[in-house]
Amino acid sequence: MPSKLHAASVIEKSEQYMPFLLEVRRRIIFAFAVFFVASALGFIYYEKIIRAILSAFELEGVNIVFTSPFQFINLAINSGFMVGAIVVFPLIIWQIILFTRPALTKQEFRLILSLLPLSILLFLSGMGFGVLIMRWVIMLFYAKSQQLQIGNFLDVSQLLSQVILTSVLMGVAFQFPIILTLLLKTGMVLYKNISDKRIIAYGLSLLFAAILPPTDVLSLIILTIPLILLFELTLALNKYILKTHVL
């Protein structure tokens, strides 16, 4: 008898959560569909995208080479992934907002909507910063090869992969101020706890930058500093302007 009651309780709970699970499934499928379409467009028009990226890097004097007869396929895939990630990111944020809307108060919903444009701006800024870092590394590589009178060759597929990885992940990392502000404003975390454990945030910033290309020490420092500055600026903003430290 108890086992039957337990089974009935499990079924009742599963039926209770089923509409939410179906809603999550629907939104995930929609996001994947948009990502697929955007990636397909990036895949089809990869030549124009690659030319635009290479021209932005101003690589005169740097020898960009293929190392495989079918490497253009990797270029098309990387191009598609980059376009898909840029297009789907704002959509994912919006889908999360719509899904959590019933559980939010009007004040919380307005706060999230007000932060949405800033979130997109930070994502694009992070991507731009990642591209600038990669461009600086390539220019340094070219300058040193000229000074030492050594030939330079860059694998175009590897170059594009590193640019995409660094730029997209830096765009995601630049979302940290938004996430931290929401957590502080909703009371899910306390300002004092975050402030007292800032050394952990520093360590996580360093660890995150360490997994990104390029892998030299100087680039590691340059990638870490903006993340730490964003953390400190977010704390200052929440303390002196948003006043979340008194919540």
Image (cartoon, grey):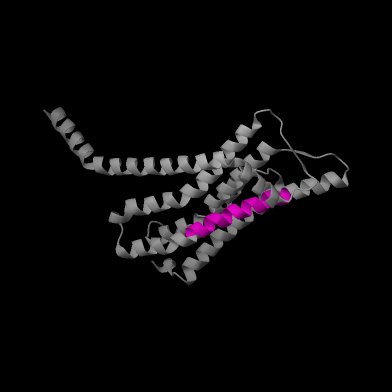
User: How far from the left and from the top, in percent, is residue 33?
Assistant: 41, 41
Whether 95 is drawn above or below 64: the answer is: below
Res. 101 visible in picture: yes
Whether 211 is drawn above or below 230: the answer is: above
User: How far from the left and from the top, in percent, is residue 71?
Assistant: 65, 31
Seen at 53% across and 58% down, the residue is 122
Seen at 37% across and 40% down, the residue is 29
Res. 210 visible in picture: no
Out of 131 and 87, give the one closest to the viewer.
87
Which secondary structure type mostly characterizes the magenta part of the structure? Answer: helix
**Residue range highlighted in magenta:** 119-137
Seen at 41% across and 44% down, the residue is 31
Whether 232 is drawn above or below 153: the answer is: below
Seen at 59% across and 57% down, the residue is 228
Query: Which quadrant, please, contains the C terminus?
Result: bottom left
Reply yes or no: does residue 66 show up in magenta: no
User: How far from the left and from the top, in percent, is residue 5?
Assistant: 14, 32
Query: Which quadrant, please, contains the N terminus?
Result: top left
Task: Left or right? Give the position of 130 relative to 119.
Answer: right
Reply yes or no: does residue 128 show up in magenta: yes
User: How far from the left and from the top, in percent, is residue 73?
Assistant: 60, 32
